[in-house]
Image (spheres, rainbow, N blue to C red):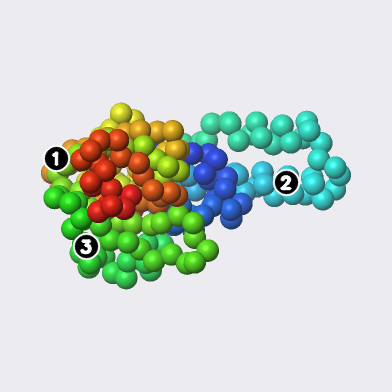
Amino acid sequence: MKIAHHPDRATLMSYAAGSLDEAFATVVATHLASCAECRSRLRETEEIGGNLLEAIDAVPLDAAAFERAMSKLNEPVEQTLDEPEQRKPSLSRPLARLVGGGLDDVAWKTVAPGVAMHRLPTSKAARGSLRLLKIAPGKKIPEHGHGGTEITLVLTGSYRDAFGRFGPGDVADLDEHVEHQPMVDSSEPCICLVATEAPTRFKSFFGRLFQPLVGI
Ligand code: ZN
Ligand code: ZN
């Protein structure tokens, strides 16, 4: 199965510029480790960024040059071959440092029936929080909106919501206006790496009970 869902271009641009919050940057870096398409998109973004900086240095920024550079961003990216052996992101990359081993070694804390969580350390400078979530097959997360942006990377298993099906390597890059109700549709638990900017707002009564437990 090919990776179908990627971080937004704006997210990749912030990542390239080094301005993406630490928690979000960890999720993006973990996705990049298994996504050749985003790696090539990132290289392109960095080149354009470099050219823009040179233009700023040389002359007061020419609006037409800026527009040309920006329009390049919207050109389709060459399809790159997926690397099947990396389809299931291994924890040997950015995440491994934080987890300190494999997913089997995670000190899960059950926060609701069928839902376990593990909070990952971030530095004091981080605004967003970073967590691993493990959700049992068939389990639904109550419908919720987001107080800020949320970016989720599936590590194992899969879930489905109004935006489609998300399997290993897929990223859901959601802004604060989005409401959704993910449901795990794999036979194994769905483990996700989630960065959130602000507390998630649950709509239902059950959701509000669930929120302080999960903390998403
Ligand atoms: Zn990607
Ligand atoms: Zn959500």
Tell which residue pokes out farthest to the right in this image.
Answer: 59
Which one is closest to the eye, mark 2 or mark 1? 1
Horizontal side of 170 relative to 187 (left or right) equals right
Q: How far apart, in angstroms, are the residues tagged by discs 1 and 3?
A: 19 Å
Which class describes the residues within 10 Å of circle 2: few (<14), some (14-19), or many (20+)?
some
Question: Which residue is label 1 attached to?
Answer: 138
**Residue 213: in sight, yes or no?**
yes
Q: Residue at x 51, y 55 (%)?
A: 21
Task: Please state, as top left, top right, bottom left or bottom right, where the N terminus lies in the image.
Answer: top left
Callout 2, which amino acid? Asn
Residue marked by disc 2 = 51
Is there a contact, CB below 8 Å, between mark 2 and mark 3?
no
Q: Which mark is residue 108?
A: 3
Where residue 109 sits in the image (x, y, percent)?
21, 62
Dot 1 amino acid type: Gly
What crowding class fits label 3: few (fewer than 14 Cα within 10 Å), some (14-19), or many (20 or more)? some
For marks 2 and 1, give the CA distance. Answer: 49 Å
Closest to the observer: 132 or 208? 208
Q: Secondary structure at mark 1?
A: loop
Residue 98 in which image quadrant: bottom left
The mark that comes first in sequence, 1 or 3, is: 3
Q: Which residue type carries mark 3? A: Trp
